[in-house]
Amino acid sequence: MFKFEELCELVRLVGSSEVGMVEIEHAGGRLRIEGKAPAAAAPVAMVAAPAPQPASEAAIASSAAPALTDTDSPDDAVADEDFHYVTSPIVGTFYRAPNPDADPYVKIGDSVDGGKTLCIIEAMKLMNEIESDQSGTIVKVFPENAQPVEFGERLFAIKVS
């Protein structure tokens, strides 16, 4: 296991850096240290994966079209618009609905306001409702229902209204 001094040094290093979280397995033990809040970790994700350019957004919009169902409305005008991405604030399992028999919280083409519940992420038997932080229209749902998601992974693309 870790010595107290080693733990203090690791916490200090993570706290003073732009790292969002560090997880270490050592000598049969596991240690997880969370650093900056998810909002502060966003620039780190941007460095690792540059923000999509308008051409990439057009590709996202066109790839969203085949996934539409009869109840969803196609939105061809989104190719030139900026998207807002809702990302996972935690590691867990993504669920589109509150229970297996219920309708999804949102579908492609649905209009959402800030604060509307978009999905649930289950982590350690706790159900965490993920809310929209932007008003607009859902244009893409990235993970499949009941799929594991990572911290910072894109969940939804919203065309800002």
Image (cartoon, helix red, strand yellow):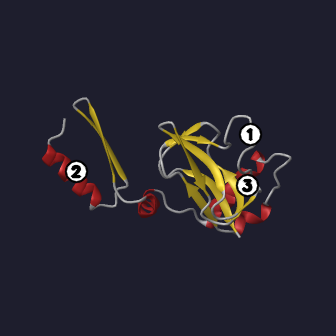
Amino acid type at mark 1: Ala
Q: Amino acid at mark 2?
A: Leu
Which numbered mark, 1 or 3, is in the foreground of this view?
A: 1
Give x and y (percent) for residue 10: 22, 50
User: In the rendered structure, which disc, 3 or 2, sits on the residue that comes first in sequence?
Assistant: 2
Q: Which residue is mark 1?
A: 102
Q: Secondary structure at mark 1?
A: loop
Left of 104 or right of it: where is 34? left
Residue 19, position in %: x, y?
34, 56
**Which residue corresponds to the image point at 59% horizontal and 65% vertical from the top-left?**
53
User: Which residue matches tag 3?
Assistant: 62
Residue 10 position (above or below residue 50): above
Q: Residue furthest top?
A: 28
Residue farthest toward the right in the current orientation of the protein: 70
Between 143 and 39, the residue placed more toward the observer is 39
Q: Quarter of the image containing the C terminus?
A: bottom right
Q: Where residue 5 sits: x, y (%)?
A: 13, 48
Which of the marked residues, 1 or 2, is nearer the chain's N terminus? 2
The local crowd at label 2, few if under 14, some if 14 to 19, many if 20 or more residues have their Cα within 10 Å, is some
The amino acid at mark 3 is: Ser
Task: Return the x and y of residue 119 as percentages of the image width and height.
Answer: 63, 48
Q: Which mark is residue 10?
A: 2
